């Protein structure tokens, strides 16, 4: 047994470090300082450059030793993230001055994080708690690195704030605007989205059952439902504002229109999902329409219905935000986005986007959890 | 046809078919699934229907169950039309597959017909316990169907058909998808159950040994058009251990069934 195991990420990280060392200065000011040794010029990474190299090289080397996986994970996590932290904090104040070695070191740190996630995802912990933790940690590291790379590239290359603010600025903006964001969320999510979602999904569901029960409705309603889904939201929204006023009601109406059709189609499909044999079985019991619906067809349709609920959770959010572009009281996520863009407050726009993404994910996650509980019996949930 | 059949018909005919025919209208033109079926099934009989696929054996069972409507002739179930009999829950039907609902536990699946028929909860519990015991599934009440083997699932579906205590049990190749060992076991259990409950059983199969082993009467059918070609009275005793299948009497009956199948099938075309 060898005393080390090679991993291509660690080797590549070491090679990138060597290349970065050979290329020399990491930033424009450092280059100037080297060119004029007589003049004292403050430049980034003056004191931390060596430490960054040491961290990355050290973590890469340690991770390849024959040590327990958790120790390797710890070494990689510390090496990659402390190095990344030093890179991010060092460049502040010197935006746009980064040279190739800065990006090479960032890439090296990212490779170490990749290796770290690879080891983590190969772990097969026996107990459930550790498993659950692992399922959270891996996507968390993934997400953190998206932010790190975003921050580092935006600051290193000096991308104008108006084009893409760094995530740290967006975070600061969120922290400083909590009352405004809360009011916007209350207006858009808790009034427009929830009301519209419940009305749209409920109406779609009931229409599907009506269309199933009454044959002529099935033939007449479904094509019209199809037409409703094809209505362009930017055309419908101003009309809804005229009908229902500037308040949340008009946005709820837009959301209801958007969510109606996916629910209708999925429920209709789901109601046809139960097998012939099962329906014959209910017939042998002389079961009536309602009994067959409740005991066989709706449970069999549940996976389809939850599918519609999931699709609609994101549609509803988009619908409500876009609808607010067409007239709204001076509060709401869509209103805020449209006005702050006009005032060049791009960080506020991003803050709203971040909040919308977070709430959308939570919304979706809650429905997915409910789905797992309700359709535990389905092969896609119970796993084969 | 025979004396016993005539006698049975007079006293307690459970199923009585006269000149029964059924023609399906398909895209390729009409298909005669059944034609000219005359058959009387008496109370307490175990009748097997055997024949190659397309001979109408399943169709006949479905006509009894009012899952298909005949296009010719007459049929009565318990002296009424199949539809009335179905509405009075005159029979339990066991399908080729277990058709258990995956979102219900085994006990809940067995309770399904009882819930639909509005049986009070306390009585439901007692009946579930009784039929689960009948099919040897006690202890599996809380399991879900997909946690059980195929044989156990099929037993659960039999328990479900027994739960509401109909006198007539219609079984459409219930063991067709199971392996031979499980099948033997379930055949034996089915005979024991029949002996204990005194039900009338109509059993569709394509296995000659299974038909001979189980039945008091074997109806041999043939396809194109689906019709009855022979009705064989079994001379075997009601008490049938598994090894009876090696006896000369058993083999003689099996031989006659095979002859009947050959005569009707027309392999020459």
Image: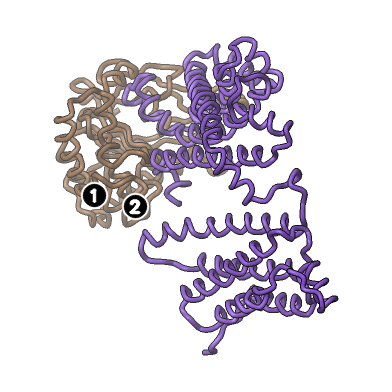
Number of numbered discs: 2
The image quarter containing residue A300 is: top left
Q: In this rendering, is residue A239 above or below A103? A: above
Q: Position of residue B200 (x, y in %)?
A: 23, 32
The image quarter containing residue B222 is: top left
Residue to which mark 1 is pinned:
B188
Q: Position of residue A86 (x, y in %)?
A: 62, 67
- In the depicted view, which residue is nearer to us: A248 or A182? A182
Which chain has been coloured purple in this picture?
Answer: A
Evaluate if marks 1 and 2 touch, with contact meaning CB atoms under 8 Å apart: no
Q: Which chain is mark 1 on?
A: B
- In the depicted view, which residue is nearer to us: B262 or A228? A228
Residue to which mark 2 is pinned:
B149
Residue B60 in sight: no
The image quarter containing residue B43 is: top left
The residue furthest right is A35
Residue B206 in sight: yes
First in residue order: circle 1 vs circle 2: 2
Q: In this rendering, is residue B219 above or below A17? A: above
Mark 2 crowd level (few <14, some 14–19, many ≥20, 10 Å Cα): few
Check chain identity for marks 1 and 2: say if they share one: yes
Of helix, strand and loop, which one carries label 1?
Answer: helix
Of helix, strand and loop, which one carries label 2?
Answer: loop
Q: Residue sitting at 30 percent across and 49 percent down?
A: B152
Q: Colour of chain B?
A: brown
Apparent side of residue A188 relative to residue B166 in the rendered image (left or right): right
- In the depicted view, which residue is nearer to us: B42 or B180? B180
> Which disc number belongs to residue A276?
none
Q: In this rendering, is residue A6 above or below A240? A: below
Spatial separation of the CA atoms under disc 1 and disc 2: 18 Å
């Amino acid at each position: 047994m060898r005393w080390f195991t090679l991993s291509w990420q660690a080797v590549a990280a070491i090679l990138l470090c060597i290349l970065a060392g050979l290329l020399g200065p990491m930033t424009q000011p450092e280059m100037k300082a080297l060119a004029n040794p007589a003049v004292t010029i403050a430049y980034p990474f003056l004191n931390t450059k060596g430490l960054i190299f040491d961290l990355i090289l050290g973590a890469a080397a340690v991770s390849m030793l024959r040590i327990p996986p958790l120790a390797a994970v710890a070494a990689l996590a510390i090496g990659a993230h402390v190095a990344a932290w030093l890179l991010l904090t060092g460049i502040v104040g010197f935006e746009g001055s980064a040279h190739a070695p800065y990006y090479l070191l960032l890439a090296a740190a990212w490779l170490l994080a990749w290796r770290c996630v690879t080891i983590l995802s190969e772990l097969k912990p026996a107990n459930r708690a550790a498993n659950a933790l692992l399922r959270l940690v891996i996507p968390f590291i993934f997400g953190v690195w998206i932010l790190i790379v975003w921050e580092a590239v935006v600051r290193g290359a000096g991308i104008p704030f108006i084009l893409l603010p760094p995530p740290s600025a967006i975070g600061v903006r969120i922290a400083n605007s909590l009352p405004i964001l809360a009011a916007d969320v209350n207006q858009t999510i808790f009034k427009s989205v929830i009301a519209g979602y419940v009305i749209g999904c409920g109406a779609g569901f009931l229409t599907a059952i009506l269309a199933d029960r009454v044959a002529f409705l099935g033939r007449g309603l479904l094509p019209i439902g199809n037409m409703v889904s094809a209505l362009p939201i930017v055309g419908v929204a101003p009309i809804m504002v005229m009908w229902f006023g500037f308040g949340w009601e008009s946005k709820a109406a837009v959301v209801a229109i958007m969510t109606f059709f996916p629910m209708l189609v999925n429920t209709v499909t789901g109601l046809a999902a139960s097998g012939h044999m099962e329906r014959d079985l209910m017939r042998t019991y002389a079961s009536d329409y309602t009994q067959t619906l409740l005991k066989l067809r709706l449970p069999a349709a549940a996976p389809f219905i939850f599918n519609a609920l999931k699709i609609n959770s994101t549609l509803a959010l988009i619908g409500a935000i876009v609808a607010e572009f067409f007239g709204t009281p001076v509060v709401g996520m869509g209103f805020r986005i449209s006005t702050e863009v006009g005032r060049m407050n791009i960080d506020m726009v991003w803050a709203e986007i971040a909040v919308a993404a977070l709430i959308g994910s939570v919304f979706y996650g809650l429905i997915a959890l409910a789905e797992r509980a309700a359709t535990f019996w389905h092969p896609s949930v119970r796993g084969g | 046809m025979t004396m016993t059949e005539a006698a049975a018909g007079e006293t307690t005919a459970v199923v009585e078919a006269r000149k029964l025919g059924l023609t399906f209208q398909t895209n390729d033109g009409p298909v005669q699934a059944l034609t000219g079926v005359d058959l009387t099934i008496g109370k307490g009989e175990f009748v097997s229907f055997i024949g190659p696929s397309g001979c109408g054996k399943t169709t006949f069972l479905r006509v009894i169950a009012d899952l298909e409507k005949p296009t010719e002739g007459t049929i009565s179930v318990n002296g009424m039309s199949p539809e009335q009999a179905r509405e009075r829950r005159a029979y339990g039907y066991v399908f080729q597959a277990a058709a258990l609902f995956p979102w219900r536990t085994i006990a809940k699946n067995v309770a399904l017909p009882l819930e639909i028929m509005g049986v009070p909860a306390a009585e439901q519990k007692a009946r579930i316990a009784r039929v689960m015991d009948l099919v040897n599934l006690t202890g599996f009440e809380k399991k879900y169907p997909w946690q059980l083997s195929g044989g156990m699932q099929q037993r659960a579906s039999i328990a479900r058909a027994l739960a509401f205590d109909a006198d007539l049990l219609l079984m459409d190749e219930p063991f067709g998808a199971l392996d031979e060992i499980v099948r033997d076991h379930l055949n034996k259990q089915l005979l024991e159950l029949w002996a204990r409950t005194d039900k009338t059983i109509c059993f569709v199969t394509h296995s000659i040994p299974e038909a001979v082993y189980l039945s008091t009467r074997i109806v041999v059918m043939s396809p194109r058009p689906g019709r009855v070609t022979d009705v064989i009275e079994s001379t075997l005793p009601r008490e049938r251990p598994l090894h009876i299948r090696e006896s000369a009497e058993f083999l003689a009956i099996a031989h006659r069934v095979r002859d009947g199948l050959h005569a009707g099938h027309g392999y020459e075309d």
